[in-house]
Amino acid sequence: MAPSTILTGRLEAGMPQEFTDRMLADHPLGRLGHPLDVANVTAFLSSEASSWLTGLTIDVAGGRWMP
């Protein structure tokens, strides 16, 4: 799994507004990631639903990294 910028309390407290605006502009979904976004992918990868997946990187990035 490859998460992009995840909005945590620590990040919010230390990130200048101009940096936040620049990061938001890079994300097609119009928001930064939340810890729950990463948790949901982790739960999926830990479940039987992902049992047929191998050798895969999942970009939890809100569309920021698209080939």
Image: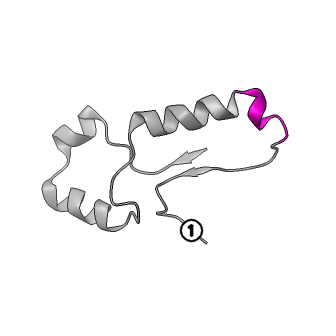
Locate residue 32 relative to residue 36 in the image: left or right: left
Give the residue furthest to the bottom.
67
Give the residue furthest to the front.
49
What is the x, y in percent for residue 41? 58, 38
Quadrant showing the C terminus = bottom right
Local crowd size for mark 1, using a 10 Å CA cut-off: few (<14), some (14–19), many (≥20): few
What is the x, y in percent for residue 14? 18, 42
Q: Is residue 22 magenta?
A: no
Locate residue 32 relative to residue 11 in the image: left or right: right
Q: Is residue 48 magenta?
A: yes
Which residue is depicted at the point 78% across and 28% down? Answer: 48
Relative vertical location of residue 54 with respect to residue 59 in this rendering, above or below:
above
Which residue is depicted at the point 61% across and 29% down? Answer: 43
What is the x, y in percent for residue 25? 30, 68
Locate residue 17 relative to residue 63 in the image: left or right: left
- Magenta segment boundaries in residue numbering: 47-52
Which residue is depicted at the point 56% across and 68% down? Answer: 66
Q: Secondary structure at mark 1?
A: loop
What is the x, y in percent for residue 4? 45, 51
Quadrant showing the N terminus = top right
Label tally: 1
Give the residue furthest to the left.
17
Residue with the mark numbered 1? 66
Relative vertical location of residue 18 with respect to residue 5 in this rendering, above or below:
below
Which residue is depicted at the point 79% across and 48% down? Answer: 55
Q: Amino acid at mark 1?
A: Met
Q: Quadrant of residue 7?
A: top left
Foreground of the two, 36 or 3:
36
Q: Quadrant of residue 31?
A: bottom left
